[in-house]
Image (cartoon, helix red, strand yellow):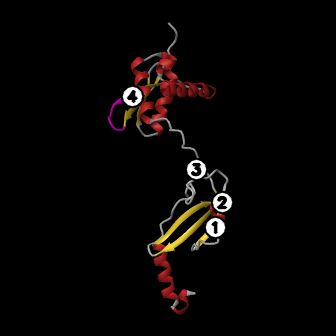
Amino acid sequence: MVFGRFSALFRVRIFEMMLAEWEIKARSHVCARTQVPFNDGETIWTLLFRDKHGFHREDVSAAAWSELKETAQPFSFWRSKYEAPPAAPTEPIQKESVEALLRRLLDEDRSEYLNTRYVLAAMLERKKILKPVDVRETGEDKILIYEHAKSGEAFLIVDPGLRLDQLDAVQGEVAALLENGLASQRPEQ
């Protein structure tokens, strides 16, 4: 071995220097030799080469490896299964759209959206956009008073006293409004 004549401490230092030259590289999505994209579940070979500038990685298809294996002299190599990256997650509901919808529903002040306004306010409270500051009870209503964390605006939300068996329907209504907008929910006139 190259390090045989050096002390153990010196060997450790050389190894640490070698590792410092290596940046972790992610698996490629195409063969380094043919540029053909890998298929999910396909067997691929990873070749790790060392040169005067450090290490570099090449991911190759099984066909390319069968042509290379007699002549290539990688520092290390291994076989693995290619896993395609997961599909990009769908965009979560944007905070601004929840807030914008709540503002529009408050401006219109239509009683059929009482439950929806309450759920939207709860969503914004969980995201720390609205802060609960007080609860007031009038003769027939319980009013939740929120303050917008950034602007300081006050939001008055009537607590509709939702029951657990009503939540699914309200959540569906909120999702439909956020996805399709308020116009899609307007009653026929």
Helix, strand or loop for disc 1: strand
Residue 85 is labelled as 3
Q: Is residue 136 visible?
A: no
Q: Residue at x 65, y 61 (%)?
A: 80
| Residue 155 tag number | 4
**Residue at which label 2 appears:** 63
- Residue 24's x, y, as percent? 50, 64
Among numbered discs 1 and 4, the one appearing first in the sequence: 1
Contact between marks 2 and 3 (CB within 8 A): the answer is no
SS state under label 4: strand
Which residue is denoted by mark 1 in the rendering?
78
Q: Nearer the viewer, residue 5 or 169?
A: 5
User: Badge 3: how crowded within 10 Å, few (<14), some, or many (20+)?
Assistant: few
Assess whether mark 1 and mark 3 are in contact (beta carbons under 8 angstroms): no
Mark before the other along the chain sequence, 4 or 3: 3
Q: Is residue 139 above or below residue 23?
A: above
State which region is magenta.
Answer: 149-156
- Separation of residues labelled 4 and 2 (CA atoms): 65 Å
Q: Position of residue 42 (x, y in %)?
A: 67, 54
Residue 188 position (above or below residue 134) = above
- The first of marks 2 and 3 along the sequence is 2
Q: Amino acid at mark 4?
A: Phe
Q: Amino acid at mark 1?
A: Trp
- Mark 4 burial class by Cα count in 10 Å: few <14, some 14-19, many 20+: many
Q: Is residue 147 above or below residue 16?
A: above
